[in-house]
Amino acid sequence: MVTGASSGIGRATAHLLAERGYRVIGTSRNPGTIAEQERIPGVEYRALDLADPASIEAFGVDLGPVDVLVN
């Protein structure tokens, strides 16, 4: 799981991990605004706002175990 996967260091980290064959869940406050050409193949984008407890709870409902978290 990589937080902030829609831009900057988070995006670069998600890209590198996906290229190396890892299953990557990339978070973004609003993944619907990520243009198709900006999406990284192999990254599953999911909504998460770490400042919003309801968003955190909704994110974790069907997440399953997380082996590595990059924040």
Image (tube, grey):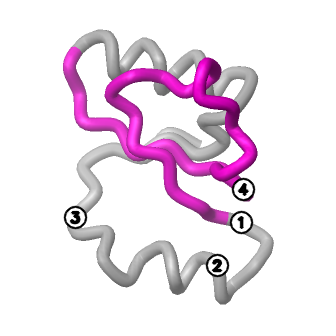
Q: Earlier in the sequence, mark 3 or mark 4?
A: 4
Closer to the eye: label 2 or 4: 4
Considering depth in this image, is 43 or 12 the residue closer to the camera? 43
Residue 61, above or below 2: below
Closer to the eye: label 3 or 1: 1
Q: Is residue 49 magenta?
A: no
Q: Amino acid at mark 4?
A: Asn
Closer to the eye: label 4 or 1: 4
Label 1 close to label 2 by CB (< 8 Å): yes
| Image mark for residue 30 | 4
| Image mark for residue 49 | 1
The residue carrying pointer 3 sits among few (fewer than 14), some (14 to 19) or many (20 or more) residues within 10 Å by Cα, namely: few
Q: CA distance from mark 2 to mark 3?
A: 18 Å
The residue that disc 3 covers is 65
Residue 23 image point, x, y percent:
25, 36
Q: Earlier in the sequence, mark 2 or mark 3?
A: 2
The residue carrying pointer 1 sits among few (fewer than 14), some (14 to 19) or many (20 or more) residues within 10 Å by Cα, namely: some
Q: Amino acid at mark 3?
A: Pro
Q: CA distance from mark 1 to mark 2?
A: 6 Å
In the displayed structure image, the side of residue 43 where residue 6 appears, left or right: right
Q: Amino acid at mark 2?
A: Ser
Q: CA distance from mark 3 to mark 4?
A: 23 Å
Residue 47, above or below 27: below
The magenta-colored residue range is 21-48
Residue 59 image point, x, y percent:
49, 73
Q: Earlier in the sequence, mark 4 or mark 1?
A: 4
Q: Earlier in the sequence, mark 1 or mark 2?
A: 1
Label 2 close to label 4 by CB (< 8 Å): no
Q: Quadrant of residue 44?
A: top left
Residue 4 image point, x, y percent:
66, 41
The residue that disc 2 covers is 55
